Image (cartoon, rainbow, N blue to C red):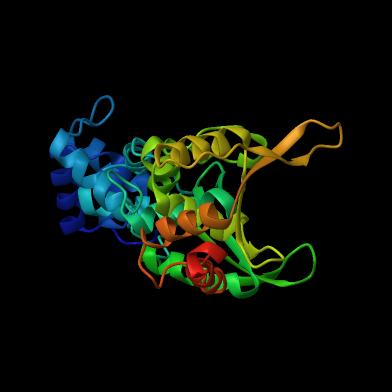
């Protein structure tokens, strides 16, 4: 900083020091170097602030609220606190950024907080199937990736979050185009983790939260991600869910609560022969009932269009005795 320290600036520095601001905070607010602030304060005989700065609860809450949208430097100027103090208070609610890193995009951080809506439960299921969480030193990341006609679901997810983050088109391992959305939000990360979604979830046999496991909207999201709706040779519908052993056990319990008895089986095994993923399969009238219950639970424009068309055909299917 190369600003000339005139009399007016010296008076401002002294007043801020008397108000309890740190030397770093004064330097940022006034626009001079920390060395200049130290010199002016010492020459004026103003006592420096001793020990860590104390922030009252109301002011701390205001800082944490603004920290979701402002950089540490902006917090320093707004509240007259030091940069390290700003980062520490923001970190108390899970917000960590590189020094001076600005917020580029807005997002609805509380999308998965409290009682979840059918749309939130659907996207939780989709994330459980095709999304993931990732953590770095400075940020918490939520990611959803889809390929083919399912790329439309990524745009729907972005709209649900009220996010401004860009959707990137990248090739998958087979060279086919994929749509990927990366959203940085500590609150989304921790809320989803609290609901049972974890980094490297394929390799963890965890349960999902009870409010999701008992929701048809959640299982529809799982179906759109890792499930399948098809038809047997004689035209009867078939619905298949895929997931970890505990997750499929939760689905079994949910189905049993509605009078539907199905047993999970092994879908994929590791190279050493141990089970990796399990599936639950329903056919005929059982599949028709499951599909009907799921699609009645969410807005009609939310599910994957290709599977929604198959679901309509499944719901229209009738046995020979029902047709006669």
In the picture, the quarter occupied by the N terminus is bottom left
Name the outermost residue toward the right. 272
Between 251 and 169, the residue placed more toward the observer is 251
Residue 123: quarter of image: bottom left
Between 170 and 256, the residue placed more toward the observer is 256
Q: How many marks?
A: 0
Residue at image coords 28%, 28%: 52
Residue at image coords 19%, 34%: 55
Residue at image coords 65%, 41%: 202
Residue at image coords 38%, 64%: 160
User: Can residue 100 be seen?
Assistant: no
Between 324 and 257, the residue placed more toward the observer is 324
Residue 226, compared with residue 58, is above or below; it is: below
Q: Left or right: where does residue 10 sit relative to residue 232?
A: left
Q: Left or right: where does residue 282 sit relative to residue 193?
A: right
Residue 53: quarter of image: top left
Residue 35, compared with residue 287, is above or below; it is: above
Name the outermost residue toward the top. 51
Percent of width and height locating residue 126: 51, 55
Between 301 and 79, the residue placed more toward the observer is 301
Residue 92, compared with residue 237, is above or below; it is: above
Percent of width and height locating residue 286: 52, 52
Percent of width and height locating residue 260: 48, 42
Percent of width and height locating residue 173: 78, 62
User: Can residue 236 be seen?
Assistant: yes
């Amino acid at each position: 900083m190369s600003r000339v320290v005139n009399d007016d600036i010296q008076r401002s520095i002294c007043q801020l020091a008397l108000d309890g601001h740190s030397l770093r905070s004064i330097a940022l607010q006034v626009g001079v170097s920390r060395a200049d602030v130290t010199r002016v304060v010492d020459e004026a005989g103003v006592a420096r602030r001793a020990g860590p700065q104390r922030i009252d609860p109301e002011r701390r809450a205001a800082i944490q609220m603004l920290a979701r949208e402002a950089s540490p430097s902006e917090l320093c100027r707004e509240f007259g606190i030091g940069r390290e103090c700003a980062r520490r208070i923001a970190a108390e609610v899970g917000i960590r950024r590189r020094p001076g890193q600005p917020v580029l995009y807005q997002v609805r951080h509380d999308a998965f907080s409290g009682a979840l809506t059918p749309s939130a439960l659907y996207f939780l299921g989709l994330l459980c199937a095709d999304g993931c969480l990732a953590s770095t030193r400075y940020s918490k990341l939520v990611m959803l990736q889809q390929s083919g006609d399912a790329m439309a679901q990524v745009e729907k997810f972005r709209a649900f979050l009220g996010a401004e983050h860009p959707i990137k088109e990248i090739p998958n391992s087979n060279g086919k185009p994929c749509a990927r959305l990366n959203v940085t939000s500590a609150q989304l990360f921790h809320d989803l983790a609290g609901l049972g979604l974890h980094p490297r979830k394929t390799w963890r046999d965890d349960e999902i939260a009870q409010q999701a496991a008992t929701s048809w909207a959640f299982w529809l999201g799982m179906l759109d991600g890792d499930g399948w709706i098809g038809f047997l040779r004689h035209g009867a519908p078939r619905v298949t869910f895929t997931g970890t052993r505990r997750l499929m056990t939760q689905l079994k319990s949910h189905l049993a609560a509605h009078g539907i008895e199905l047993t999970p089986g092994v879908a994929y095994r590791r190279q050493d022969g141990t089970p990796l993923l399990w599936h639950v399969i329903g056919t005929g009238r059982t599949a028709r009932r499951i599909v009907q219950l799921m699609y009645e639970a969410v807005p009609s424009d939310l599910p994957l269009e290709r599977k929604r068309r198959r679901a309509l055909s499944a719901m229209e299917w009738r046995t020979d005795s029902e047709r006669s």
